Amino acid sequence: MAEFKYGLVYRPPSIGAVPKGYVHYDPSNQGIDGVRHGVLTYDHELTPKEVSDFELKPLFGKADLHKLPEAVQRKAKEAIEQLNYIYEEKISREDAPEAYADAEKILSIFRKYAQSKGLNPDECLEALGLNPHALANCVVSKSRTFVSRIMARLTEV
């Protein structure tokens, strides 16, 4: 069954506030910009008029990763490979501070870019091959929130 997800931007679901026929409601905002009242899942795609009339934000998952430009995906994959390698080889932050910083910066930019396109960045990172243990290995104070959000998403699956 195909799933089509839409973020609730201005109001929670209630009679007349959302299109009829949703199959699931997730009250969390799933870390997506602009989604304040949860996410609705439908088994069919809503029309552009429904999306506009009900002020919904279309969301996409890892099946829609192809919607990101190849150059963006390639850069994210490089950062993911770098973090995975650092983890697998047990290289410490002290031994390779630039490698950690570069990979973290690229993933942070990728995450913001994916969100701006209505994609779930955590699902995109997972689809691109991110090892969640590698990401946990790169925690620094300024990226602790970023890492914990991704880890929470990846460990739910």
Image (cartoon, helix red, strand yellow):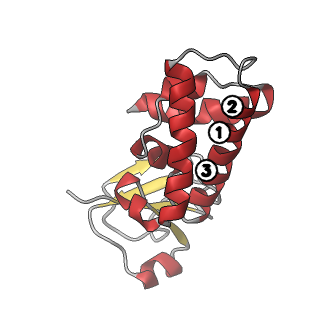
Work out whether residue 26 or residue 117 is closer to the camera in this orientation and state it: 117
Q: Are marks 1 and 2 in contact (CB under 8 Å)?
A: yes
Crowd around label 3: few <14 · some 14–19 · many ≥20 (10 Å): many
Which mark is drawn over residue 103?
1
User: Is residue 43 left or right of 140 when viewed as pictured?
Assistant: left
Q: Quadrant of residue 36?
A: bottom right
Residue 131: image location, x then y, percent? 46, 30
Counting every numbered tag in the picture gives: 3
Q: CA distance from mark 1 to mark 2?
A: 5 Å
Q: Which residue is mark 3?
A: 111
| Residue at disc 3, secondary structure | helix
Residue 117: image location, x then y, percent? 55, 65
- Residue type indicated by callout 1: Ala
Q: Nearer the viewer, mark 3 or mark 2?
A: 2
Residue 104: image location, x then y, percent? 67, 38
Q: Which residue is mark 2?
A: 100
Q: CA distance from mark 3 to mark 2?
A: 16 Å
